[in-house]
Image: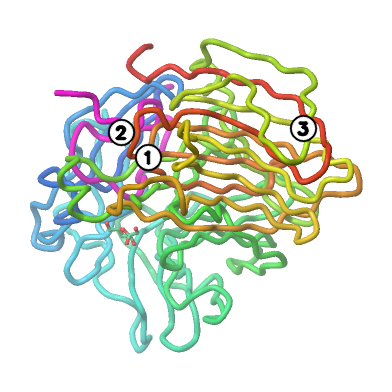
Amino acid sequence: MPMDPHRPRYHFLPPHHWMNDPNGLIQFDGLYHLFYQHNPLAAEWGRMVWGHAISRDLVHWEHLPIALAPDQLCDKDGVWSGCVVSDGATAAAFYTGVNPEVQCLATSQDLLAWEKYAGNPIIAAPPDGMAVTGFRDPYVWRAGGLWHMLVGSGIRDVGGAALLYQSPDLHTWTYRHPICVGDRARSGEMWECPNLFPLGDKWVLMVSPFGRTIYFTGTYADDRFTPDYQGEIDLGGCFYAPQVFRDDDGRRIMFGWLFEWRDKAAQLAAGWAGVQSLPRVLSLGAEGRLHFAPAPEVETLRRRHTHHPELRLLPGGDLVPGISGDQLELSLTLHLRQANRVGVRVAVSPDGAEETRIIYDRQAGVIGLDTTRASLDRASHGDLHAAPLTLRNDEPLRLRVFLDHSVLEVYANDITCLTGRLYPSRSDSRTVSLFTDRPATATLDAWELASMEEG
Ligand code: FRU
């Protein structure tokens, strides 16, 4: 079979068929485990199971057999998203069984063989009298001698909500209250996949209100979360339902589902759909904003390196630094000087008919990812996505760009991420170039990146 030109090579995806949310992220006995929402029968969403993979370095993954599949009455229609926690030598997986949406438990000693709790569901229904918009995606942690669980939910006509339950033993759960209720106009009416964790001197609540992922930083006291900042996790338009876990080094690491931007027929024909983002390390910046950086382990993929210490960009024509490929990392520092609009093109065809642009507009304070001309193939859906980014006076634009066939991840000045999908129809849509509207300078490092299988 010819190589599928759009299939990512250094991002994680299952051998075949459909994947969505990352689930159950944990480092257990030193190994990283990634479970994920998976339809093992087709490249479309269906009756979900938990797929499973392990890694020593977050970058090279080994596929393992399916971990959890529907086999109880309460999960007969699917094993939906959830988490894994360790309770001494035992691992406990919490997930949503459907239909209806109920919370379930399975345990394991080795994370390979799982035993579902005979008393499932452990939470059989949403709180009495609450008009919920959903009830799923348990997130569990231990504090103060008790287990705590958030269930993603929302109150109809009010806003998203993260519902708190507590348990002395992982089996018996008591409802307490919502730790936080959002405002429907600002943060949606249903919060999928809640995550709550301390970072620096703040707490972070991260939720996925259909199609976008937002975070709040604030305080968490007396089992209530009070937000004082609201931000976006990734504004590129294909990043959703992330999960964050703490590894043995104390890092908070996030994976998110990158969904496809092409027709269902094209996905079915390709035989795969859905990719995980690169592992992103989170830290807390000024004003309660999150900072994002690809995990340093990703650097082990770097191969052929090109270094351009001082490129002079001029208006009226692109600068072509002689870099091309579909598995690339670019690290770019752009000094705008008098320039207002600067940017990078990737996956450019020789005649310019196909190209993907990353554009920074200083006056507008906006960074954009433009895939409207990424492909001549009508089955793929390009778009223009933008995110706010304000640079201080002479602060340079710092971009880290990861191209992996149909995946493009952009990290701008550590605080803004834009991840998109591109499906160029031509095999020569491979060139990188830089552009500006006034003279500017740039430092550029570029690497070809190895495929995951190359070790
Ligand atoms: C998020 C989500 C979750 C749910 C899962 C089902 O993408 O809708 O809320 O548990 O996917 O696959």
Name the residue type under label 2.
Answer: Arg
Name the residue type under label 1.
Answer: Pro
Looking at the rendered structure, the number of numbered marks drawn on it comes to 3
Q: Is residue 323 left or right of residue 192?
A: right
Residue position for label 2:
7
The residue at 23%/44% (across/down) is 50
Q: Secondary structure at mark 2?
A: loop
Residue position for label 3:
313
Gap in angstroms between the C-alphas marked 3 and 2: 33 Å
The image position of residue 61, as x and y in percent, is: 34, 24
Residue 424: numbered disc: 1
The image position of residue 367, as x and y in percent, is: 66, 52
The residue at 49%/45% (across/down) is 244
| Residues packed near mark 1 inside 10 Å, few (<14), some (14 to 19) or many (20 plus) | many
Where are the magenta residues, as a range?
A: 1-30
Q: Is residue 202 above or below residue 192?
A: above
The image position of residue 169, as x and y in percent, is: 36, 52
Name the residue type under label 3.
Answer: Leu
